[in-house]
């Protein structure tokens, strides 16, 4: 499992508190070999916090990346996408990230600024190719390039094994830095993966408003790396929701430099590939869940578990319909076991394999494991509200107690197949409205 994750409580207001998940991973020798990070506070953020992050590999890397599906794409997204296509996913050594400004909808000047960030950072670390670029912050404002260029220069002068500072430097409305590390063994060699990400609002499947970088010293060819990233994202970042909005800047990129010394992974059918794919998926899932736990104004982490689906596609469609329902999310905030709202979301989801008379439903504390038709269904943590399409006797007091937990789950068993799918979301709260009604001011 992941190293050293602890919980600390952050008070949102006088009546609401939620467990925020801080990473306490230390900057140890378990970081991927050959990677260093540099950070600096150049003044893009009013708070004076870190806002520039430079990641450098001493050896050229294969890279795979996935970008926002929003038709409106920020300048760094367009540039990074074109660089990866131009160099066919190979030969990269550096990534430059700024927070405090999205560089989106900024026209030719914004495109020029992204190019400057790319060229300057790669030059300073003696990389053969231009750096990939990520930016995050308010849309429609030009970056102060005097500050940015100074920040990049200072970050390049202070490269070290400090991933926690890197995670802090890319935060915007995040309350906590998001960092994971994992080690596996391939061919008798220790392979290391480190990941950082940011995101707390504008979160929706098919890429949310988030930036994520995974770095590994595994030796894997570019096509296999692309496959592993695609798989990892499908069951992590494409399986979370906060508010249904999609950003202009979303990017997930993975860099692999091969310094672990394992035999190069070529086949996506090999056991070595499957080990790495699993580890990448675990890292991405942990980071994705951190985003939901740190969601703007959230008081609950909600697992939406669909069982008995005819196809995985049906399961995902239904899970997404429930996870994006404002009525369901507000009911969870109010600790109201309003199963009718959930059932309605199942019905209008558009999934084919929905037979109303087959559906059973539970609410539970925790992650929803072992809840459903034929499962353990421990009555101390779960309560059934629907059986074969009909309501079951309800204990309002017990239901409210279950939903008073900070980690809760909604389990819908379609009883129409053997496929399942899980998404993660949060409640919709007054504090979310407050945070987003005054975001620019």
Image: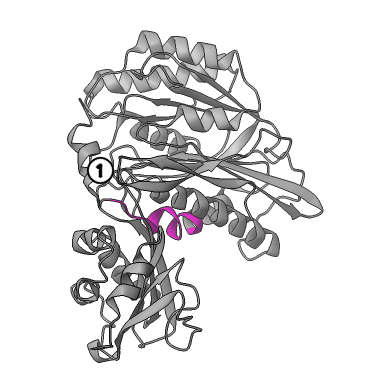
Residue 347 position within the rendered picture, expressed as x and y whole percent measured from the top left: 20, 77
Instruction: From this view, report whether residue 224 is shown above or below residue 386.
Output: above
Q: Is residue 401 above or below residue 13?
A: below
Mark count:
1
Magenta region includes residue 178: no
Label 1 environment density (alpha carbons within 10 Å; few <14, some 14–19, many ≥20): some
Q: Farthest right residue? A: 188
Front residue of this view, candidates 89 and 370 = 370
Residue 94 shows in the view: no
- The residue under the point 48% across, 36% down is 177
In the image, taking residue 370 as reference, residue 24 lies left or right, namely: right
Identify residue for label 1.
431
Determine the residue positioned at 75% across, 54% down.
Answer: 185
Indicate left or right for 11 with 95 as reference: left
- Tell me the colour scheme of the image: one colour
Q: Is residue 257 visible?
A: yes
In this view, 423 is above or below 52: below
- Span colored in magenta: 231-242
The N terminus sits in image quarter:
bottom right
In terms of image quadrants, where is residue 31?
A: top right
- Establish if 278 lies above or below 343: above
Is residue 371 or residue 153 the one in the foreground? 371
């Amino acid at each position: 499992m992941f190293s050293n994750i602890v919980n600390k409580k952050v008070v949102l207001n006088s009546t609401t508190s939620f467990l925020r998940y801080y990473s306490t991973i230390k900057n140890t020798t378990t970081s991927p070999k050959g990677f260093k990070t540099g950070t600096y506070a150049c003044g893009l953020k009013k708070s004076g916090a870190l806002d520039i992050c430079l990641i450098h590999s001493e050896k050229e890397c294969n890279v795979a990346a996935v970008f926002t599906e929003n038709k409106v794409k920020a300048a760094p997204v367009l540039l990074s996408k074109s660089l990866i296509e131009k160099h066919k996913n190979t030969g990269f050594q550096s990534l430059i990230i700024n927070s405090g400004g999205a560089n989106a909808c900024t026209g030719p000047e914004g495109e020029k600024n992204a190019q400057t960030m790319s060229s300057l950072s790669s030059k300073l670390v003696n990389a053969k190719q231009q750096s990939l670029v990520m930016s995050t912050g308010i849309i429609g404002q030009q970056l102060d390039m005097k500050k940015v260029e100074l920040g990049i220069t200072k970050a390049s002068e202070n490269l070290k094994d400090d991933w926690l500072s890197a995670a802090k430097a890319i935060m915007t409305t995040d309350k906590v830095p998001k960092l994971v590390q994992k080690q596996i063994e391939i061919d008798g060699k220790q392979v290391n993966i480190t990941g950082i990400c940011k995101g707390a609002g504008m979160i929706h499947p098919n890429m949310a408003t988030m930036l994520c970088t995974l770095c590994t010293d595994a030796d894997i060819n570019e096509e296999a790396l692309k496959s592993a990233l695609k798989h990892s994202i499908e069951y992590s970042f494409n399986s979370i929701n906060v508010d249904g909005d999609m950003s202009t800047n979303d990017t997930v990129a993975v860099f692999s430099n091969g310094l672990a010394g394992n035999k190069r992974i070529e086949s996506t059918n090999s056991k070595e590939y499957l080990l790495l794919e699993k580890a990448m998926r675990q890292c991405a899932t942990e980071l994705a869940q951190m985003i939901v736990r740190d969601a703007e104004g959230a008081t609950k982490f909600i697992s939406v578990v669909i069982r008995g689906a005819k196809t995985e596609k049906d399961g995902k469609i239904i899970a997404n319909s429930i996870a994006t329902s404002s009525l369901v999310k507000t009911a969870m905030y109010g600790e109201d076991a309003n199963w009718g709202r959930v059932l309605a979301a199942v019905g209008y989801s558009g999934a084919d394999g929905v037979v109303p008379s087959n559906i059973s439903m539970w609410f539970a504390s925790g992650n929803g494991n072992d809840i459903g038709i034929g499962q353990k269904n421990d009555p101390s943590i779960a309560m059934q509200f629907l059986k074969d399409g009909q309501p079951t006797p309800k204990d309002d007091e017990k239901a409210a107690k279950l939903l008073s937990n900070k980690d809760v789950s909604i389990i819908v068993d379609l009883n129409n197949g053997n496929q399942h799918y899980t998404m993660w979301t949060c409640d919709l709260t007054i504090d979310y409205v407050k945070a987003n009604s005054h975001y620019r001011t």
